[in-house]
Image: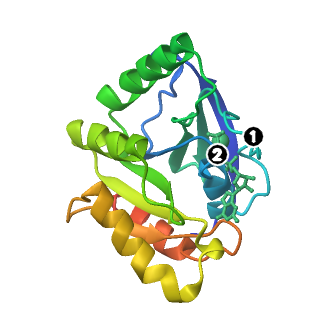
């Protein structure tokens, strides 16, 4: 996909602020610091439109990015960051539920896991949570550049197994460093957009 236009439309903390136009929407979910914002930037060929950081917890709101006046990416705050108070965690939970439960234009969730490691308990919970809302999930195994080529298949197999990934859901190995897997991610996104 050739991206000519990408802009942040709103950083929302509640439903009232979500954009009104009904473009197909794709949300990014994953652990803090796993690479959600980096994946958005890579997909749209921008260095830092979605702000990234080596410190976890950079993204704190639901950030809606409008792409080519035709779809939205929603960057979502990460989970599983230990240094978060109970109160913060509850706020996060409320914000997630409000969004995932009844966001009509949401076509699929892009769940990002770190391909180097087994999906964490939080990853498995997030996947199950999304399936509870009957949302299609595109699972991304990111940081592929950090894995020796000979181990790639083993890591993919392990991730799918630990998540007990639904046969209808897609798993894509990806690297925001090298761009490997980028076309496959766009292909998966397009498969959820009616012509
Ligand atoms: P939060 O907003 O805090 O939840 O984090 P995030 O998931 O948006 O992560 P972010 O994109 O900010 O990336 C976190 C760190 O991981 C940054 O230092 C990135 O450069 C690095 N990173 C992300 N993707 C990759 C990748 O594919 N390969 C490598 N080697 N590093 C990556
Ligand atoms: Mg982020």
Q: Secondary structure at mark 1?
A: loop
Measure the C-alpha gap from mark 2 to mark 1: 7 Å
| Residue at 59% in and 50% down | 34
Quarter of the image that includes the C terminus: bottom left
The reply to whether the C-beta atoms of the residues labelled 2 and 1 are less than 8 Å apart is: yes
How far across and how far down the image is residue 58, in percent?
Answer: 70, 35
> Position of 103 compared to 55: left or right?
left
Vertical relation: 172 (above or below) 25? below
Q: Nearer the viewer, residue 133 or 18?
A: 133
Q: Is label 1's Cβ within 8 Å of ligand 1?
A: yes
| Residue at 46% in and 62% down | 140
| Residue at 48% in and 56% down | 113
Vertical relation: 110 (above or below) 182? above
Quarter of the image that includes the N terminus: bottom right
Mark 2 Cα shell of 10 Å, populated few (<14), some (14-19), many (≥20): many
Task: Mark 2 or mark 1: name the one nearer the start of the chain.
Answer: 2
How far across and how far down the image is residue 75, in percent?
Answer: 57, 40
> Position of 146 compared to 149: left or right?
right
Q: Secondary structure at mark 2?
A: loop
Looking at the rendered structure, the number of numbered marks drawn on it comes to 2
| Residue at 72% in and 63% down | 45
* Mark 2 lies on residue: 33
Q: Residue furthest bottom?
A: 150
Q: Is label 2's Cβ within 8 Å of ligand 1?
A: yes
The numbered disc on residue 55 is 1
Q: Nearer the viewer, residue 150 or 35?
A: 150
Vertical relation: 182 (above or below) 193? below
How far across and how far down the image is residue 2, in percent?
Answer: 62, 69
Mark 1 Cα shell of 10 Å, populated few (<14), some (14-19), many (≥20): few
């Amino acid at each position: 996909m050739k991206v000519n236009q990408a802009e942040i439309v709103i950083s929302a903390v509640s439903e009232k602020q979500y954009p009104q136009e009904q473009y197909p929407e794709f949300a990014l979910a994953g652990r803090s610091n796993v690479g959600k914002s980096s994946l958005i930037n890579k997909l749209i060929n921008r260095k830092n439109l979605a702000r990234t950081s080596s410190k976890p917890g950079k993204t704190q709101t639901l950030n809606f990015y409008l792409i080519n006046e035709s779809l939205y990416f929603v960057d979502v705050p990460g989970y599983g960051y230990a240094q978060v108070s109970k109160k913060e965690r509850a706020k996060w939970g409320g914000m997630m539920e409000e969004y995932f439960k009844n966001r009509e234009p949401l076509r699929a969730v892009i769940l990002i896991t770190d391909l180097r490691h087994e999906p964490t308990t939080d990853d498995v919970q997030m996947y199950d949570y999304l399936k509870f809302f009957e949302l299609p999930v595109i699972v991304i195994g990111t940081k592929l550049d950090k894995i020796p080529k000979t181990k790639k298949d083993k890591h993919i197999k392990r991730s799918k197994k630990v998540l007990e990934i639904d046969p209808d859901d897609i798993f894509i190995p990806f690297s925001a460093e090298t761009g490997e897997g980028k076309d496959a991610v766009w292909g998966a996104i397009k498969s959820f957009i009616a012509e």
